[in-house]
């Protein structure tokens, strides 16, 4: 049977567009179906515009804190948040157009509209039908809501609504202390908003090492951000001036008042209403797609990647999953499902937080033989020079083999530094390889080297 395309991709986010381009590079004729803007949530209303806001928040804060050391006083009376918002939109639009260029350059057809699977090889878009030997579903996710705290994007916001604010509230409550919630807490606080974070678990950023999180929480507290852990929101009342949120926790019952409430409790997979179950694709009880070693579904020819899988809902995860799936389609499988311990997590607060692999708590729970090594940034010359000494590099490792089990960094440029350690783990290098490698001086990466030396008992600058 002949098909119009070798591959039809539903969704043009970081998973979909990367997979389509990789397919084209491998000689497959590909098309992408997109109902909105190219680039998906990440580029348009997610990671990219949020990082633009974080960048501006950091500049705004540092302009006041850093220049004060030189005796300069910064007049912020003309501050206009709408200009910050406009900058974030310009960045998002520029990158969306960049994806359009990349797809055109790689001869990937773009089909505008909402795609629905009619059978394993046919995607209906409006009244038109497109066929492919393979179909890759990369439809992403949407902000999750909970009964009683329904999002209206007026006073009860999702991350999308928060990104689209053109005027800042005086006070905001953030329900959920995950990466998105903590990043928004940093942005809003940097611009003078009074922020309260409510987290049901006993720790914000629950996927991170507890010592790393302690540094971030301490820094946030110094800036006036209130963080309530082990606290559950029990009711919400909308008022003329905003919202009243009732919270119950270790300190008892309290009522929090604010102009806005940001609900940041995770994201739900976009798997309903696109024909998946009708053609036999299996979903779990939460609506996530079940896949095999190369992200193939139970239906031959249909693959799924990204936020619709029960894997970390991260853009770089979706991109890698797309590459693995497409290589399998092309008959050139190189690697299987992405190992969880090789997925880096990054939180772009100030200080930054990043890590991968097993936390100390997880290593202990698994009954593994492990040790930890922590090297503080106060012992790194570059960190002292730029005035960012809070934080450290922490290694979780096997004391017998010196194998890296996990690594976590809190401090300046943590989201960049973590990749040296991840590359070492992926390449099966040991602590000795890092500790003896020459690192340029002065650089923040010396903290990585010194952490490895710390594990071996011969750190120099501590």
Image (tube, rainbow, N blue to C red):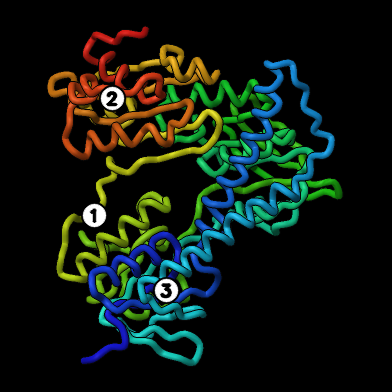
Q: Give the number of the mark in front: 1 or 3.
A: 3
Q: Residue at x 41, y 12 (%)?
A: 379
Q: Which residue is mark 1?
A: 337
Circle 1 packing at 10 Å, graded few (<14), some (14-19), many (20+), is some
Q: Earlier in the sequence, mark 3 or mark 2?
A: 3
Between the C-alphas of marks 3 and 2, the distance is 45 Å
Between the C-alphas of marks 1 and 3, the distance is 29 Å
Q: Residue at x 36, y 52 (%)?
A: 317
Q: Is residue 254 left or right of residue 454?
A: right
Q: Which residue is mark 3?
A: 104
Taking the image as drawn, is residue 369 in sight?
A: no
Residue 93: quarter of image = bottom right
Q: Nearer the viewer, residue 184 or 287?
A: 184
Circle 2 packing at 10 Å, graded few (<14), some (14-19), many (20+), is many
Q: Give the number of the mark in front: 3 or 2.
A: 3
Between the C-alphas of marks 2 and 1, the distance is 24 Å
Q: Position of residue 188 (x, y in %)?
A: 68, 39
Q: Position of residue 72 (x, y in %)?
A: 75, 20
Q: Residue at x 41, y 63 (%)?
A: 287
Q: Residue at x 86, y 49 (%)?
A: 240
Q: Please determine whether, in this image, residue 462 is positioned above or below residue 134.
A: above
Q: Does dot 3 land on a helix, a strand or a loop?
A: helix
Q: Is residue 167 left or right of residue 97?
A: right
Q: Nearer the viewer, residue 2 or 55?
A: 55
Q: Nearer the viewer, residue 117 or 58?
A: 58
Residue 396: mark in rendering: 2
């Amino acid at each position: 049977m002949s098909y119009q395309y070798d591959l039809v991709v539903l969704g043009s986010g970081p998973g979909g567009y990367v997979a389509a381009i990789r397919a084209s590079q491998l000689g497959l004729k590909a098309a992408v179906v997109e109902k909105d803007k190219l680039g998906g949530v990440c580029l348009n209303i997610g990671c990219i515009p949020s990082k633009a806001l974080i960048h501006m928040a950091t500049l705004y804060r540092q302009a006041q804190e850093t220049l004060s050391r030189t005796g300069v006083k910064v007049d912020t009376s003309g501050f206009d948040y709408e200009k910050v918002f406009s900058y974030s939109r310009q960045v998002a639009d520029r990158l969306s157009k960049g994806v359009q260029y990349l797809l055109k350059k790689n001869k990937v057809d773009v089909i505008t509209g909402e795609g629905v699977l009619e059978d394993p090889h046919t995607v209906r878009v409006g009244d038109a039908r497109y066929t492919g030997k393979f179909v890759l579903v990369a439809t992403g996710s949407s902000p999750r809501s909970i009964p009683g705290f329904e999002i209206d994007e007026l006073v009860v916001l999702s991350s999308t609504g928060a990104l689209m604010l053109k005027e800042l509230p005086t006070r905001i409550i953030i329900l959920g202390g995950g990466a998105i919630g903590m990043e928004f807490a940093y942005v809003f606080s940097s611009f003078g908003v009074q922020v309260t974070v409510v987290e049901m678990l006993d720790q914000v950023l629950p996927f991170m090492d507890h010592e790393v999180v302690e540094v971030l929480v301490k820094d946030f507290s110094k800036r006036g951000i209130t963080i309530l852990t082990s606290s559950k929101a029990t009711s919400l009342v909308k008022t003329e001036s905003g919202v009243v949120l009732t919270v119950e926790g270790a300190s008892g019952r309290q009522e929090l008042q604010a102009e806005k409430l940001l609900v940041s409790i995770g994201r739900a997979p976009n798997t309903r209403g696109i024909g998946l179950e009708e053609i036999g694709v299996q979903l779990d009880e939460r609506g996530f797609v079940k896949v095999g070693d190369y992200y193939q579904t139970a239906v031959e020819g249909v693959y799924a990647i990204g936020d619709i899988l029960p894997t970390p809902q991260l853009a770089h995860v979706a991109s890698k999953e797309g590459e693995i799936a497409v290589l399998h389609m092309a008959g050139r499988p190189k690697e299987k499902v992405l190992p969880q311990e090789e997925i880096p997590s990054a939180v772009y607060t100030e200080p930054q937080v990043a890590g991968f692999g097993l936390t100390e708590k997880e290593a202990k729970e698994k009954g593994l033989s492990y040790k930890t090594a922590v090297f503080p940034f106060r012992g790194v010359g570059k960190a002292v020079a730029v005035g960012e000494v809070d934080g450290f590099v922490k290694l979780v490792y096997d004391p017998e083999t010196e194998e890296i089990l996990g690594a976590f960094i809190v401090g300046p440029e943590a989201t960049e530094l973590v990749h040296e350690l991840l590359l070492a783990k992926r390449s099966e290098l040991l602590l000795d390889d890092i500790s003896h490698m020459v690192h340029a001086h002065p650089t923040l990466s010396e903290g990585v080297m010194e952490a490895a030396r710390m594990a071996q008992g011969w750190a120099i600058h501590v």
